[in-house]
Amino acid sequence: MKYFKSMFKNIAVIFAKVAIFLLPQKIVAKLKNKYIYQPRIKQLKVGNNHTPLFGRIYFEVRTRCNGNCDFCAASMENEKRADTTMPFSSYKKVIDELSEIDYSGRVAYHVNNDPLIFSELEQYCDYARKSLPKAWIEIRTNGKALTKEKVESLISAGINELKVNDYSSRQSQKVANAVESILNEVIPVYCDYNKDSNAYVLKDSKRELIVSYNDRDTHEVLSSRGGTSPNKKSKPEFSSEFCEHPFYQFNITTDGRVSKCCADLYFSEPMGNINQEKVLDIWYGEKFKAVRSKLFEGDRKMRLCEECDYYGVRCVNTRLGQIIYSATK
């Protein structure tokens, strides 16, 4: 049955590609808007003048990555930024403000960096866990600095998720072997496995813990990331598409600047600075409002946005929308 479903979907995508090639671009844009962007806008519960609180906050705790990915300007070969770290006082200010509003979204420690090479990561996670008991704390890493001892300390610090994107597997099995060792030797000591939720549950606190491993390729060609991607410099074919990023994510770099989205590698167009303003004042401020208003209307004629070929949404939930997405991405 799965084979036939997959075959039907592939045939549908081929027909859709032919139809889209023949249709006027205005009609294609309307189809994308109706079946892809509008369902996502509804899911986000946003409007032209209404945006709920972000569901994800990302702390770039150190402006360094230990990866060599071709697609990333923050890789070791391409890095131009100064090596800086986020002071705990700045981080604490944000967490304390989130605590005041009982924040229950996602807290993560990556923007264009790898959090495991930040020496004080456990301290930062521990403070978030104690201050934001309802939040979901995520560590996303390439796994190069992953050790059993590091995972044990992060579990003790209160994380909910460890996601490993391994870009080195074609050269070495080191990261894959480390993850396997952690799953076999560390996780069972601290957790039981819950089949219903497909997650581990800590024995002492009943806190959920998800550990995932993804085999990636360091030579991948992804999005242009606002024109900063070293291996994709082509101009986007569209400039009139919605983009979800400034509607649900809040990105902070080491000196407190807040970007409009994760693609702004250098935080060159800051929406504010958490050292001088409150988080909510930045999120609901005029700069963010102006960006969202344009993107809500499908206008990407802004700095960075006009250089970015990100499709605008990561997930498409409707079947017809998935076919159109596959045919147009």
Image (tube, rainbow, N blue to C red):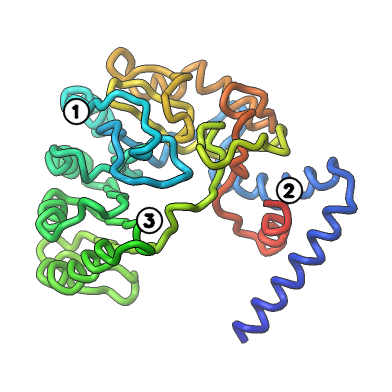
Give how far across and how far down residue 185 sits, in percent: 13, 72
For label 2, the residue is 32
Q: Amino acid at mark 1?
A: Lys
Q: Secondary structure at mark 2?
A: helix
Q: Amino acid at mark 2?
A: Lys
Apparent side of residue 201 relative to residue 38 in the rendered image (left or right):
left
Question: Mark 1 or 3 closer to N-term?
Answer: 1
Q: Tell me whether the residue at label 1 lies in contact with that at label 2, contact meaning CB atoms closer than 8 angstroms.
A: no
Apparent side of residue 117 relative to residue 310 in the rendered image (left or right):
left
For label 1, the residue is 92
Q: Within 10 angstroms of label 1, few (less than 14), some, or many (20 or more) residues? A: some
Give how far across and how far down residue 323 sits, in percent: 71, 62
Question: Mark 3 or 2 closer to N-term?
Answer: 2
Q: Amino acid at mark 3?
A: Tyr
Q: Tell me whether the residue at label 1 lies in contact with that at label 3, contact meaning CB atoms closer than 8 angstroms.
A: no
Q: CA distance from mark 1 to mark 2?
A: 41 Å
Front: mark 3 or 2 = 3
Q: CA distance from mark 3 to mark 2?
A: 32 Å
| For residue 137, above or below residue 5 | above
Q: Secondary structure at mark 3?
A: loop
Apparent side of residue 209 relative to residue 12 in the rendered image (left or right):
left
Give how far across and how far down residue 239 sits, in percent: 71, 32
Question: Mark 1 or 2 closer to N-term?
Answer: 2
Q: Nearer the viewer, residue 88 or 223?
A: 223
Q: Nearer the viewer, residue 15 or 105?
A: 15
Front: mark 1 or 3 = 3
Number of numbered tags placed on the structure image: 3
**What residue sits 89% from the left and 45% below the top?**
24
Q: CA distance from mark 1 to mark 3?
A: 32 Å
Q: Secondary structure at mark 1?
A: helix
For label 3, the residue is 167
